[in-house]
Amino acid sequence: MKVIDTLIPEVKIIEPEVFGDERGFFYESFNRRRFFELIGSDPDFVQDNHSKSARGVLRGLHYQIEQAQGKLVRVASGKVFDVAVDLRRSSPSFGRWAGAELSADNRRQMWIPPGFAHGFLVLSDDTEFLYKTTDFYAREHERTVQWDDPQLAIDWPIDDLELRLSDRDKSATPFASAEFFS
């Protein structure tokens, strides 16, 4: 397993060691001991989520203001551009974002600690997205920051995509009006 740094020190890309031959492949997608050695964090994952989305679907930027969730995300089939935005006021990277392409082919994962908003854009025809969370989903604490807020200036790879957003994501809160973590 290899860790790749992003522009935000706490957000990490994790590349597993893949063992493959003509029969297929095997890799360890999570090992708590190894994760702690590499990341320096020992999350207690309590929930696994699995979503399927079509090309051009943009989900995010979501977070929970209470019961903040750390997320370990990966793609089982297809490809996404994955983004984390730092919402911790006391952080030197407050308001900055880190992004990476995650795919079934590159098998990369992204660790997004609590205190970040998260979103992804589907770049392939069909994508299955998996993520582990460190706290349970709580609808009453869920918040959404505008995915295309000019203050964040996220460089989404949307050149040839017809975007598809939920009503909630279409009416998301601008970054300047969002609730932040201390």
Image (cartoon, helix red, strand yellow):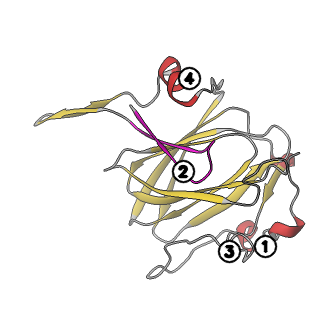
Residue located beneath label 4 in the image? 36
Using the numbered discs, state the Cα–Cα distance from disc 3 to disc 2 in whole angstroms. Answer: 20 Å
Residue depth check, mark 4 versus mark 2: number of the one nearer the observer: 2
Residue at x-position 49% and y-position 56%: 100
Q: Which span of residues is magenta-colored?
A: 2-15
Using the numbered discs, state the Cα–Cα distance from disc 3 to disc 1 in whole angstroms. Answer: 11 Å
Question: Mark 4 falls on what kind of element?
Answer: helix
Quarter of the picture holding the C terminus: top right
Does the stretch in magenta take in 9? yes
Residue located beneath label 1 in the image? 171
Whichever of labels 3 and 1 marks the residue nearer the N terminus, that label is 3
Whichever of labels 4 and 2 marks the residue nearer the N terminus, that label is 2
Residue 28 located left or right of residue 66: left
Amino acid type of the residue that numbered disc 1 sits on in the rendered structure:
Ser
Amino acid type of the residue that numbered disc 3 sits on in the rendered structure:
Asp
The circle drawn on residue 28 is: none
Using the numbered discs, state the Cα–Cα distance from disc 4 to disc 2 in whole angstroms. Answer: 18 Å
Pointer 2 and pointer 1: residues touching (CB < 8 Å)?
no
Question: Mark 2 falls on what kind of element?
Answer: loop
Residue at x-position 62% and y-position 50%: 8
Using the numbered discs, state the Cα–Cα distance from disc 3 to disc 4 in whole angstroms. Answer: 34 Å
Residue 39 placement (x, y as % from top left): 56, 31
Question: Mark 3 falls on what kind of element?
Answer: loop
Residue 26 located left or right of residue 161: left
Residue at x-position 78% and y-position 48%: 91
Residue located beneath label 3 in the image? 148
Residue located beneath label 2 in the image? 6
> Height in image: 110 above or below 17?
below
